[in-house]
Image (cartoon, grey):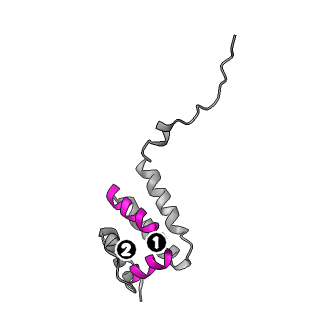
Amino acid sequence: MHSRREGPSPITASDLMQPEPIEIRRKRLIHRSLYTGMKETDLLLGSFARRHVASFDTAQLDQFERLLAEPDPAIFAWAIGRELVPPDHDNDVMALLRRFAQALRP
């Protein structure tokens, strides 16, 4: 007679392919925005994310996540208008971030 071992079920490939719930994704992106590595970018993106990420739809979350994959100095330079935004990031989320950054300037 074999005894059945009780405990958590093993993770399967289909478990890993389940989409991340949108609220979990939003929380993850907000957290990631607060800890980018460069203090200026942390402050800018963290406050931006806290204010706007909750209202982002899936496409905007995708845009923001792609932006967060870029180097901090580049994100900061684009946001404050020091450098031109490259075409692949020239979207509504970047426009909102640029307006947000401008509003913070004295």
Residue 67 on the magenta span: yes
Q: Which residues are magenta?
A: 58-80
What is the spatial separation of the Cα atoms under label 2 and label 1, in whole angstroms? 8 Å
100 vs 16, nearest the viewer: 16
Q: Where is residue 85 drawn, in percent x and y?
A: 35, 78
Q: Where is residue 95 drawn, in percent x and y?
A: 31, 74
Amino acid type, callout 2: Leu
Q: Where is residue 52 drawn, in percent x and y?
A: 38, 65
Residue occupying the point 37% across, 81% down: 103
* The N terminus lies in quadrant: top right
Residue occupying the point 30% across, 70% down: 91
Above/below status of 106 relative to 88:
below
Residue topped by disc 1: 45
Quadrant in the picture for residue 26: bottom left
Residue occupying the point 65% across, 25% down: 6
Tag 1's secondary structure? helix
Residue topped by disc 2: 97
Residue occupying the point 52% across, 35% down: 12
